[in-house]
Amino acid sequence: IQGLVACIALLVWQMVYTRPRFSELIEQPMMEAGGTSWTQASIVFLGISLANFVHSISFMYTLRHFPGGAVSAGILKGLQAVLVFAATSVAFCGNTHVGGDEMCFNGAKLLSLIVVVGGSLVYGKATELQTKKEASGGYKIVPDAVVDDSAI
């Protein structure tokens, strides 16, 4: 239902804000960018739409089928963030045209990497142990307590 609400909100935004300013917000920047064609823009738009669709399906699959559900999804999101800033450091550190020094790997990012990866490993191991415990019947059944009312 969240996806439907977000889709409706985006559609309303497009109709109320973007459509009246279409030339200013869409057509003029396309021309300034060197004459981007509608075909090129449509291909990019469809590619982004497909990537978002695959991302949403993957997220819902994770919530439903991974041990831990939403927590596992959060752990994977943290790992994704670590990979993104590591990749941007490799791709953009020192590049004067795109990015700059803020894209470089530094001590704070290293600490973040250690915390996220370490936490992910600890969580993964704990989940594995919990799953094994559940599968082996490792829980003790607590018998019902009988209360003697006459003692009260």
Image: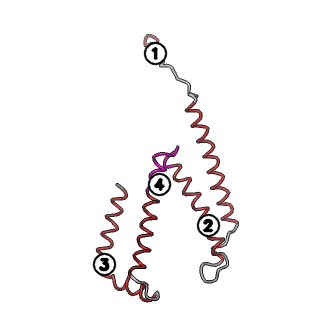
- Disc 3 secondary structure class: helix
Q: Disc 4 and disc 3: Cα gap in Å?
A: 31 Å
Q: Are marks 4 and 1 in contact (CB under 8 Å)?
A: no
Residue at numbered disc 2: 85
Q: Disc 2 and disc 1: Cα gap in Å?
A: 60 Å
- Quadrant in which the C terminus appears: top left
Extent of the magenta region: 57-70
Mark number, residue 19 = 3
> What is the quadrant of residue 81 in the picture?
bottom right
Q: Is residue 46 above or below residue 122?
A: below
Badge 2 or badge 1: first in the primary sequence = 2
> What is the quadrant of residue 80 in the picture?
bottom right
Residue at numbered disc 1: 147
Neighbour tally class for label 4: few under 14, some 14-19, many 20 plus, Cα within 10 Å: some
Q: Disc 4 and disc 1: Cα gap in Å?
A: 48 Å
- In the rendered image, residue 148, in percent from the top left (x then y), is placed at 45, 12
- In the rendered image, residue 72, in percent from the top left (x then y), is placed at 53, 49
Tell me the kind of residue under disc 2. Answer: Phe
Nearer the observer, disc 1 or disc 3?
A: 3
